[in-house]
Image: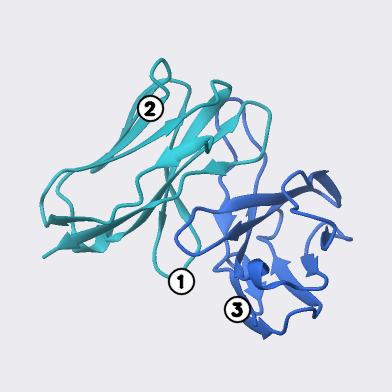
């Protein structure tokens, strides 16, 4: 079993919809939780991070972490065609630098 | 340059050959990482440098893989006796140090796509 599980999709939704992406994990030592966006043939770019549990909002994006359930989510409101990309969750332990990534979910927003 | 630069962007080689992949990090970033991304998968950690030294090489799959960063800036990932299973995109990233509760953001390059025939 992988440390971080993420449904690879693909996920296709109409423009303007609310998108929900999520990951589960098994290692309770993870403290930093990140969401990356990766366009085709590009490197991942950081969207948001959360330290420990809680919610964080940045514009149309909201990240949630539920450590009791070992479950993290990313919500995208008012989705745009430019949001079409692969979304990767990633996490790491306190004091460690190694990021453990999920498989990535391929998202398409249809105009 | 403004971002992380990786060369070559594409490399096709034959099974058994030796390959070097280069990473030029963002100026001033002391931390440098190598990850490997297979098709349809997330990046997989290989090695992390802090300055010139490899602080964590636990992700290197076997002794055919080696990485160096002799002057604390540019890094080279070296793969000996390449195998077809080594085919993947090799991603390099650099970051500034963590601040308490705030992780240093990793900036990734576009990757070197390695194909072993």
The residue lying at 27 percent from left, 56 percent from top is A10
Give the chain letter for blue.
B
- Whole-angstrom CA distance, mark 3 to mark 1, is 10 Å
Figure check: B9 above or below A26 = below
Foreground pick, A50 / B59: B59
| x and y percentages locating residue A77 in the rendered image | 18, 43
Instruction: Say which colour chain A has.
Output: cyan
The residue lying at 67 percent from left, 38 percent from top is A97
Q: Can residue B30 be seen here?
A: no
Q: Secondary structure at mark 3?
A: loop
Foreground pick, B70 / B15: B15
Q: Secondary structure at mark 1?
A: loop
Image label count: 3
| x and y percentages locating residue A65 in the rendered image | 38, 26
Per the image, the residue denoted by label 1 is A41
Badges 1 and 2, same chain: yes
**Pointer 2: residues within 10 angstroms few (<14), some, or many (20+)?**
some
Q: Quadrant of the C terminus of chain A?
A: bottom left
Q: Secondary structure at mark 2?
A: strand
> Tag 3, which chain?
B
Q: Quadrant of residue B86?
A: bottom right
Q: Can residue B84 be seen here?
A: yes
Q: Is residue A54 left or right of residue A15?
A: right
> Tag 2, which chain?
A
Does the residue at mark 3 contact the one at mark 2 (Cβ under 8 Å)? no
Q: Is residue B16 left or right of residue A23?
A: right
Among numbered discs 1 and 2, the one appearing first in the sequence: 1
Per the image, the residue denoted by label 2 is A71
Residue B9 bears which disc, if any?
3
> Tag 1, which chain?
A
User: Which of labels 1 and 2 is toward the front?
Assistant: 2
**Pointer 3: residues within 10 angstroms few (<14), some, or many (20+)?**
some
């Amino acid at each position: 079993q992988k440390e971080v599980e993420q449904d690879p999709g693909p996920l296709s939704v109409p423009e303007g919809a609310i998108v929900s992406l999520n990951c589960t994990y098994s290692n309770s030592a993870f403290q930093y939780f990140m969401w990356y966006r990766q366009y085709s043939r590009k490197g991942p770019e950081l969207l948001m991070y959360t330290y420990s549990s809680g919610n964080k909002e940045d514009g149309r994006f909201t990240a949630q972490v539920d450590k009791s359930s070992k479950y993290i989510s990313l919500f995208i409101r008012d989705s745009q065609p430019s949001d079409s990309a692969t979304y990767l969750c990633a996490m790491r332990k306190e004091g460690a630098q190694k990021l453990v990534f999920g498989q990535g979910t391929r998202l398409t927003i249809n105009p | 340059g403004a971002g992380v630069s990786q060369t070559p962007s594409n490399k096709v080689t034959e099974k058994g050959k030796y390959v070097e992949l280069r990473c030029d990090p963002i100026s001033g970033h002391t931390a440098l990482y190598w990850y490997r991304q297979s098709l349809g998968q997330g990046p997989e950690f290989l090695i992390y440098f802090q300055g010139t030294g490899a602080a964590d090489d636990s992700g290197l799959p076997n002794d055919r893989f080696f990485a160096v960063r002799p002057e604390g800036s540019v890094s080279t990932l070296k793969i000996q006796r390449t195998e077809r299973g080594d085919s993947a995109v090799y991603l390099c990233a650099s970051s500034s140090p963590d601040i308490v509760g705030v992780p240093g953001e990793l900036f990734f390059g576009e990757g070197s796509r390695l194909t072993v025939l």
